[in-house]
Image (cartoon, coloured by chain):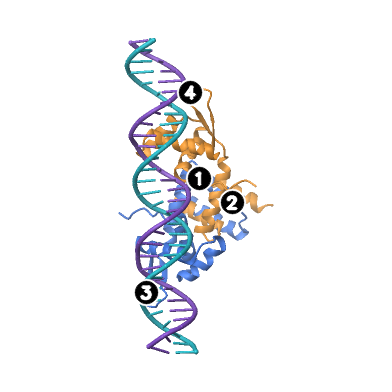
Chain colours: A orange, B blue, C purple, D cyan
Amino acid sequence: MSKVFKPTESELEILSILWDKQTATVREVHEIVQKTKDVGYTTTLKLMQIMNEKGLVTRNVLSKTHIYTPTLQREIAQEQYVNKIIQTLFSGSTSQLVLQALGKHNPTTSDLDEIKNMINALQNK
Amino acid sequence: MSKVFKPTESELEILSILWDKQTATVREVHEIVQKTKDVGYTTTLKLMQIMNEKGLVTRNVLSKTHIYTPTLQREIAQEQYVNKIIQTLFSGSTSQLVLQALGKHNPTTSDLDEIKNMINALQNK
DNA sequence: GATTGAGTACGAATCCAATCGTAATATTAT
DNA sequence: ATAATATTACGATTGGATTCGTACTCAATC
């Protein structure tokens, strides 16, 4: 049984960057982190080292500058967090979450079409 | 400008209970918390006292057993967490979140109808 | 009015995330 | 080779969340 995926706040931020870039060095990650937070390079480094120990990322050590890759599929994290948010914030109602998401943000027309198709597919089975 | 709403993990769990019950005593909350976590009564008490200091809840002290109420609208928390999850886990795509939610869970037919209506309303403006 | 029971108040301890300074190591340029 | 630069390794500190033991308070019951 796989342990529960439970990254800290900062770890999730770094994972989010790695998921977008697929692969990155500490410096690359740090440059993005810095846009939001004012922290030192070694802080980001240390975090990523810890994430490596925890198995949240793997790293290629062949070259001097290590190259990091996220271990976990983004999809797994997505599912876990969506589940949790539905439970704690929407009393277990998926549709409430969906309505909130659609209402407060501004999905494009094609987004909406895509969602309609999804719904039709779900209803026609 | 209102401060950012940022309850801790445990605080969010308690808020979630209060949102469902509207109002509750420490004991009532604790009884629910205990189903999940094995913690002492005074731990829950202390947490709720701290939440009171932070302004996350208010309490009625008229009777000996205090009665707690959440300060914050659940809706505000919902919006904040949904925003965050969209950014960190769905690269900013609302529709991706919606698709994930609809796919992995099992909304009822009437849920889906409701969502379709919502979409139509959004498209017809 | 003493005792018991259920509650609150509060301090202290523990744990862990986050941060950073400094040393060690490797690479590049002079 | 040496100096300068970039990177990693690591230890230590800080701060906040969490936990709980114990003391205190009040009300009901004997």
Left or right relative to A71: residue D4: left
Q: Nearer the viewer, residue B84 or B54?
A: B54
The residues tagged by marks 2 and 3 sit, at their Cα atoms, a distance apart of: 44 Å
- Residue at which label 2 appears: B102
**Marks 2/3 same chain:** yes
Query: Which chain does tag 3 point to?
Result: B
Q: Closer to the camera: disc 1 or disc 2?
A: 1
| Tag 2 secondary structure | helix
Which numbered tag is attached to residue A64? Answer: 4
* Mark positioned earlier in the residue sequence (4 or 1): 1
Q: Residues within 10 Å of mark 2 (few under 14, many from 20)?
A: many
Image spot of residue A116 (x, y percent): 57, 49
Can residue B92 be seen in the rendering of this structure?
A: no
Left or right relative to C23: residue A112: right
Residue at (39, 33) in percent of width and height: A41
Q: Closer to the camera: disc 4 or disc 1?
A: 4
* Mark positioned earlier in the residue sequence (2 or 3): 3
- Residue at which label 1 appears: A7
The residues tagged by marks 4 and 3 sit, at their Cα atoms, a distance apart of: 62 Å
**Which quadrant is the N terminus of chain B positioned in?**
bottom left
